[in-house]
Image (spheres, rainbow, N blue to C red):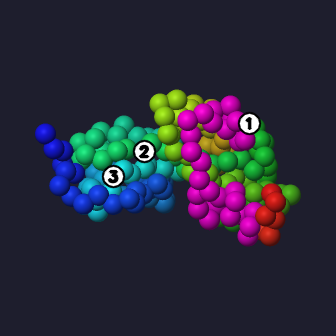
Amino acid sequence: MAGPGAGRPVRSFAHLHQHTEYSMLDGAARIKDAVALAVEDGQPAMAITDHGNMYGVLDFYKECRAQGITPIIGTEAYMAGSSRFDRPVRRGRLDDTGGEGDRGEKLYYHLTLLAETTKGYRNLMQLSSSAYLEGYYYKPRVDWELLETYHEGLVATTGCLGGVVLQALLAEQPDE
């Protein structure tokens, strides 16, 4: 028996960076609507990568399955500028990287993480929980130590303007 997405042309494109209504002040897409548009567009899969949380994951998973496309579970993590335990004094205005600390350092960066396996999904949950329990400072933050511990089964992308790679390039520090 064919699912709701059957009979539509399948493209080789899938959104891997998608914010929903669970990304405060950044996402407005309703999960059901976003999945329906991906199906209409012929996408075989779609990711959810809300900022710093996984609140919409269950609804997203169920909707993708109901609509006949593959759900890709992810999050756009906030990476602490150094350690998740640091609490630098913030100065200036807030931007995509949390603004700057009193020593000119970035408070956090963005890193898009996608679960490739069941182990990766479990690691995403652990990272998200640890970000809130140990790293919360303006935002739920992880750091390289946590990522090293819980990296198995994950795919990381450079994300957006607030990503570590792009920020290093913008600061003309490509080796960072």
Q: Which residues are magenta?
A: 143-170
Res 62 → quadrant:
top left
Describe residue 81's horizontal placement relative to residue 142 as left or right: right
Residue sitting nearer the eye, 98 or 66: 66
Residue 78's tag is: none
Which residue in the protein does label 1 denote?
145
Along the line of sight, which residue is nearer the eye, 129 or 94?
129
Foreground residue, 22 or 62? 62
Q: CA distance from mark 1 to mark 3?
A: 34 Å
| Residue under label 3 | 44
Q: Residue at x 72, y 41 (%)?
A: 144
Q: Which quadrant does the C terminus fall into?
A: bottom right
User: Tag 2, which secondary structure?
Assistant: strand
- The secondary element bearing badge 3 is classed as loop
Q: Is residue 2 magenta?
A: no
Q: Is residue 163 magenta?
A: yes
Kindly identify the residue that appears in the image at 16 percent across and 44 percent down: 2
Tell me the amino acid under the disc marked 2. Answer: Ile
Q: Is residue 57 visible?
A: yes
Residue identifier under label 2: 72
Whole-angstrom CA distance, mark 2 to mark 3, is 11 Å
Q: Please tell me which residue is depicted at 17% across the width and 55% down the height of the picture.
A: 7
Which one is in front in this view, the residue at disc 1 or the one at disc 3? 3
Could you tell me the amino acid type at mark 3? Pro
Please tell me whether residue 118 is drawn above or below residue 98 in the rendered image.
Answer: above
